[in-house]
Image: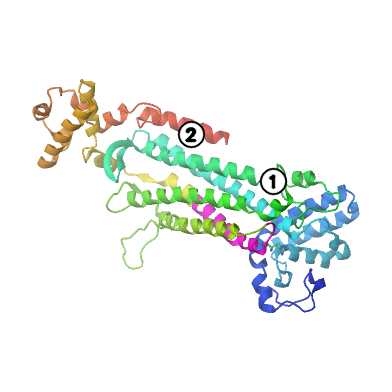
Amino acid sequence: MSQQRPKALWGGRFTESTDAFVQAFTASVEFDRRMAREDIQGSIAHATMLAEQGILTETETHIIIDGLRQIEGEIEAGEFSWSITQEDVHMNVESRLIDLIGDTGKKLHTGRSRNDQVATDIRLWLRNTVDRALSELTRLQSGLVAIAEREAETIMPGFTHLQAAQPVTFGHHILAWNEMLERDAGRLIDCRRRMNQCPLGAAALAGTSYPINRERTAELLGFDKPTENSLDSVSDRDFGIEFLSVASIIMMHLSRFSEELINWNSTAWKFVDLPDRFCTGSSIMPQKKNPDVPELVRGKSGRMFGHLIGLLTLMKGQPLAYNKDNQEDKEPLYDAADTLLGSLRAFADMMPSLVVNKKVLKETAICGYSTATDLADYLVRKGLPFREAHEVVGQVVALGVQTKRELYEIDLSELQAFSGLIGADVFSILTVEGSVSARDHLGGTAPVQVKAAAARAKAKLQKR
Ligand code: ARG
């Protein structure tokens, strides 16, 4: 980054040059150059509209667009020389344009301000991030639905309070995650729709005295329409806050999911094996295979929540309209995008290779009196009110605990001592297969329901 300090583009009214520290302190180019492509895209749309409205000549606009494309090429090739004297990405590009094409370049900024320019750039950049996040999310969800189809009959323990509660199918458990991600996708789509309005034309804050066509720039940039109010357009960053809220919810979900994978993969649980290529070893303990990817995703959720609180706090004290405070929106948004896209990608890549240890899952599902509710339901079907059935089964469980036996290991005669309603047919409902198959309704864990739910989930993903 060049440090020489020629006059800034706005230097006209100043009698001394900016203090060197202040220049570095106020500059944003070191980070906002990340939006250079969007900045050029916005400038091309603006210049195109200016010519169509007769504000610039066709020739001037051609020269400007050619210059901008050349700058885009220089940036992509890594040949562009960024300078903090030009403060931010917008002025770096504009001053390079003036170097390249001379006085015509000075006409590009007609009828706009960096305030509507930056508000446009961030929206374009964030819209692209949302699209990328949606496609990674879709990839992850497709992987989960495939696991659900494959493991619709695989039995595992279902937990409440992390205590064995009732057996469920693995496919059902995985589809629970898919539902959360499905809502996340809906939130991303909503957030994109609200952000997809074009602030160009708001200029510094009040609009511009040139006969601009705001519908046209909005259309050229793929926005649904121009924003309604110039003051609001240049000042609020609620679309960024909304994105961070959605991203925080996604990271919260991925963090919970990570926590399960870490438990499932642990030496104590052994429910699943994470693929080696998503784990790392220990520099001292040769036997270790650590679930670093889920651990990192769980950890990264923290910085995402921090960015959300950061941007809310950044916004809350600002009077209308633009204030320099808003320059602080970019680093959190950039980091949020990297964190979100990286975490989604890691999950989408990792999940299809998850190895499910069916034997351990089933053995664990059988333990812990997990079919006690089925026994109570059995007694209810034989005519006992549920509360009484609950009491009877509680006593049977107590016997099992004392004599170290599971329900299906207790003899029929012993069971009948608790209730004369119990017959030999009880043993089929005490199995984990019987338990899951009995929950055969919409949203239940029975394999047939899981297969149908997976098919519905797949159809939704195909329509997205
Ligand atoms: N770098 C600034 C930002 O990120 C661009 C807008 C500056 N506008 C101004 N009037 N100083 O917000």
Answer above or below: position of 378 versus 6.
Answer: above
Given residues 345 and 440, the one toward you in this image is: 440
Give the x, y percent position of residue 314. Answer: 58, 60
Choose mark 2 or mark 1, whichever is in front.
1
Q: Is residue 338 visible?
A: no
Give the x, y percent position of residue 362. Answer: 27, 39
Q: Is residue 5 visible?
A: yes
180 falls in the magenta region: no
Given residues 13 and 142, the one toward you in this image is: 13
How crowded pointer 1 is (Cα within 10 Å; few <14, some 14-19, many 20+) is rated as: many
Answer above or below: position of 9 versus 319.
Answer: below
Name the residue carrying label 2. Answer: 457
User: Is 356 left or right of 390, judged from the image as shown?
Assistant: right
Which quadrant is home to the N terminus? bottom right
Task: Give the residues drawn in magenta, as a range.
Answer: 320-344
How crowded pointer 2 is (Cα within 10 Å; few <14, some 14-19, many 20+) is rated as: some
339 falls in the magenta region: yes
The reply to whether discs 2 and 1 touch (Cβ–Cβ < 8 Å) is no
Q: Secondary structure at mark 2?
A: helix
Snapshot colouring: rainbow
User: Is 350 left or right of 246, judged from the image as shown?
Assistant: left
User: Is 106 left or right of 74, judged from the image as shown?
Assistant: right
Q: Main secondary structure of the magenta part?
A: helix
Identity, as a three-letter code, of the amino acid under mark 1: Gln
Give the x, y percent position of residue 250. Answer: 49, 48
| Quarter of image, ligand 1 | bottom right
Which label is found at residue 197? 1
- Res 20 → quadrant: bottom right
Which label is found at residue 119? none
Identity, as a three-letter code, of the amino acid under mark 2: Ala
Residue drawn at point x = 61 percent, y = 51 percent: 238
Which quadrant is home to the C terminus? top right
